[in-house]
Structures are given as C-alpha cells and as structure tokens.
Amino acid sequence: MMNTPLILTQMIERAEKFFPNKQVISRTSTGVQRFTYKEFGERTRRLASVLTKFGITRGDKVGTIAWNHHRHLEAYFAIPCIGAVLHTINIRLSPQQIAYIINHAGDKILLIDEDLLPIVENCKDELKNVEAFIIMTDRPELPETSLSPVYHYEDLLSEGDALFTFVKDIDENDPAGMCYTSATTGLPKGVLYSHRGIVLHSFALGLADGGSVSEKDTAMPIVPMFHVNAWGLPFACVWFGSNLVLPGPNFTPKILLELMVSEKVTISAGVPTIWIGVLKELENENYDLSHVRYLLCGGSAAPKGIIKMFEKKYNIPFMHAYGMTETTPLALISRLKSEHDELPEEDIYELKAKQGILVPGLEMKVIGQNGEVKWDGIEMGELCLRGPWIASSYYNDDRSEETFKDGWLHTGDVVTVDKGGFVKIVDRTKDLIKSGGEWISSVDIENALMAHEAVFEAAVVAIPHDKWQERPVACVVLKDQYKDKITEDELYEFLKPQFAKWWLPDKILFMNEIPKTSVGKFLKRALRDQVTELLNV
C-alpha cells in the first residue's frame, strides 16, 4: 500500500478542485457574506502567505479569538497548511485563564474579531510571546485599540499571494491544532490535534452511521469554532464539499432559525441550551424546516422530552453525540440500529436519549469497582477510550498522568452500557451522588425534571448529610409563563412514579438561572456552593 500522509492540505485542495462553486455563507456584524470555495481557497492561500511573511513557520502557534465566520474558517486551514498550529481560544474563559493559555501555548500571533478586542486588551500586559495582533473586521479602517502592533486582516490579505503553495511535506503526526479544556476545575489543559487525527475524525463524520455529512448537505455549526474545532464540522464540510453556514456573533434563536430557512440548512449542531432556545422560538412562530435532516446535540445530555418535542411536534430528527476536548471530539453517536425499527415508541426514545454507540475506529472499555462492567444497562463504571483521534496526553502538563493511563483516556464520565452497546452517561465521577452507600445519577433526575412542561432547566447537586453521606438537591428554572404557578410539591408528584423514594431530591429550589461553564454546561461546582450557602449546610 502507498504510505501517503493524511494532512489538511488535501482537504482544502479537494474543495478547490471538485467543489469550486459550493459556498461558505458567513454572517458577520454587517450582514451575510457569500464566498465560493474557489474564493475561500484563494483567501486562505493569501492568509497563509501573509503568515509566512510574518515569520510563522512549522510548529509555531497562532491563536484565534473569533466567532463562527469565514475569516475564522480561513485560519482553520491557512495555519495548519503551512505546518503551524491553529490555537482556537475559548472567549468565555476569564482574562486570567486566557492570558494563561496564550502564554502556555506560546502563541506568536493572535487573530482577533473587532468586537472581542476587550478580551485581549484586558490581559495584554501579561502576554509574553505575542508579536502581532491581526484584527478581523468588516470596516475598512482599524478600530482604536491599546494593542500594538496591530494589522488589518483584509489589508494584509490584499497583499497576499492567491497562488501560494501550501507546505507538502508535513508529517501527518505533526500538530495541526490545539484547544484547551473549559476548566471546570483548575487551570485549562491543552490538547494537541494531529493532522492525521483531524483527517480520520473527518472520515468518521462522513460515515453513514457517523455524522453522514456529504456534498449534498448544507451544514450550520452553532457550536463555537473556538471550542473543539466546532466538533470537526468545518474540516469535514470543506473536505466533502458541503455548503457551510456560519452564524457569526450575537445570534438569537430567531436568527438561527431564519438562517436555517433561508439557506435550507440540512444539518446543524449545538449544545442543549441552544436547542432549548430554538424550541421556545418555534412555539412563537412558524418556520419551514422540512429540509433539515437532523440536529446534532452534544456537550451535555438533552432530556428525552426535548428530543420528543423536536421529532414528534416539529418532525425534525434529533441526534445525540458524545465527546470531549480530548477526543477531537466525536466518540459516540446515537444512531439506532435496524433491529430497533420495530421497538415501541417509548423504547426508541429511551435509546435516543442515550449518548449512543462507539464510532468506528475507536475502542472503549468501562471500568467499575471490580474491573470491566457488565453490558446490562445497570452496572456503572468510568468510560475509557482510545483511538487515532484520541489525545494521548495534555500539552506540557504534568496532570496528564491523572487522565491518560495504560494507553487509555479515562474520561471521568460514569456510564452504563446496554446489551446492544448503547452508552448512557450517568454522571461525571465528581458529580455522582453517593447516598447511604448507593449511587444516584444527577443526570437522570435532571432529565426527568426537564421533561415537565413547566421546567426550562434543571440541575442536581449533592449536599453533605449527617446520616446518608450525601443527598441530592434539585435546582429548577421555570419557563416564563409558569413562574410562580408551579409548586415544589407538584414537581415531587411528577418525579415520584419515576424513581425510588431514596432517589428523590431532599429539596427542589426555584432559581432565576443556573451557572454554566464557558461552553454552556452546568457549572456544578458553583451551583453546589450556592446551594450550600442557601441551605446553610
């Protein structure tokens, strides 16, 4: 067999050659802009040539602080295709964390959206290695800023070489990108993604039983491009020739739905909080979404009630996926098997609410207290993964040994596996509630609460208990129309038929909002502190 390298240059070159007329539809602060893949390729080559003139070479890190738009997509390919490393920076981290990851990565250049300049200005004095700031803006002039030296992205591109040749002799195992974890505990940890890993991950997104992304699709990644490569969709879509819709900054559920309709989006991807907001908007106004093949949900589990609502009320297929920063991220996807076709409806939705089965190319094991667990859907253990797009360590971080052991990634997620191999996330190891020696899944209680028509969001945390060690407390945000109309007792009555008595929360607290991480997950640590203070325990 020919030993040809798997590198990102082949992705963009395929798009230029075979799909020159397919489009990148980019919503920016001034409106919607359209570029063919031919134009996108030329702009990307211009950017690559500019970065080379700045002295960027193999292994150098270039950071991006940007929304989902065409300029960010150009950076996705220009940087790795000259052998450098694309560092997508999570804009929702604190200024201290952002300064830490820029310094830890060793970023030499930062590409920054105009409206995100304050993020960098707030920590500029702490940056040690940054030699230039390139501002991405629709305006012809540079905005006022305390950063220096600054350059105008479009001015630089106008001077770039549209025929620039990408580097061809890149080692497929060299890093192409990097992303830092969202730091639920401690400082963020950096994960490097190799060219080979990204290419193979993109293959998985194109499998019929993976993401099934194809040239016929118009995909809209709502998940930010600054977090785990927008789940790999920008890479896969360019490679396969799919139209890409990039929703830009400050979008609302209404804006997202209008884009879906106007561009005839077939695939979209986001976290549950996004889809909850979209559902609320669908209740207010009619939208023709008959062209949508599926909505992909990840980041955290979507309650069964939300899945049902999309599929039964609006006839929109809804699909779970699972991954994390360390897995590039796709690892599990909830595609039903042919044997499930004849199952009763309720059983089908039970499966759809799980995270799914392992994507081809990866391996998994689930380790409990006594070794690998039974695949019975009951016994719990920690999910461990390995494969060609799974990280093997953190970047220059001595915490690697806590997570990567014996060639496996220990995810920290507690799961069950049914006899068909469908994985269900029960909890994070640190969030699992142990009451009287027995485990309680906070996720199961959360999902049950969010199935109630009055509940907008629900999160469950453990609080200390003298007798039982820990007990669950539920925190609930009601939908606007139900505020002050639903009681704690009503929610208890709703939960009672679904759980053993000892699983029921000791208290249900009504809150205005639940604290979240930078990527929209419930921030259990902060919530636990709030509850402990509120209940004086």
Image (cartoon, rainbow, N blue to C red):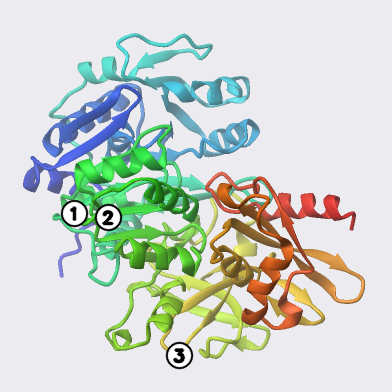
Q: Nearer the viewer, residue 537 or 310?
A: 310
* Disc 3 element: loop
Quarter assignment of residue 21: top left
- Name the residue that disc number 3 marks: 419
Q: Are marks 2 and 1 in contact (CB under 8 Å)?
A: yes
- The location of residue 262, given as percent across then percent down, is 21, 41
Spatial CA distance of label 1 from label 3 is: 33 Å
Residue appearing at x 60%, y 22% in the figure: 122
Spatial CA distance of label 2 from label 1 is: 7 Å
Residue appearing at x 20%, y 63% in the figure: 3
- The location of residue 505, given as percent across then percent down, is 74, 69
- Name the residue that disc number 1 marks: 217
Spatial CA distance of label 2 from label 3 is: 30 Å
* Disc 1 element: loop
Compared with residue 213, is residue 362 higher up or lower down, i.e. above or below?
below
Give the mark, 2 or 3, whose residue is nearer the N terminus. 2
Give the mark, 2 or 1, whose residue is nearer the N terminus. 1
- Identity of the amino acid at label 1? Asp
The answer to whether residue 465 shows anywhere in this view is: yes
Compared with residue 440, is residue 279 higher up or lower down, i.e. above or below?
above
- Name the residue that disc number 2 marks: 267
Give the mark, 1 or 3, whose residue is nearer the N terminus. 1
Graded by Cα atoms within 10 Å as few (under 14), some (14 to 19) or many (20 or more), the crowding at tag 2 reads many
Relative placement, left or right, of 270 versus 523 is: left
Relative placement, left or right, of 487 versus 301 is: right
Comparing marks 2 and 3, which lies closer to the viewer?
A: 2
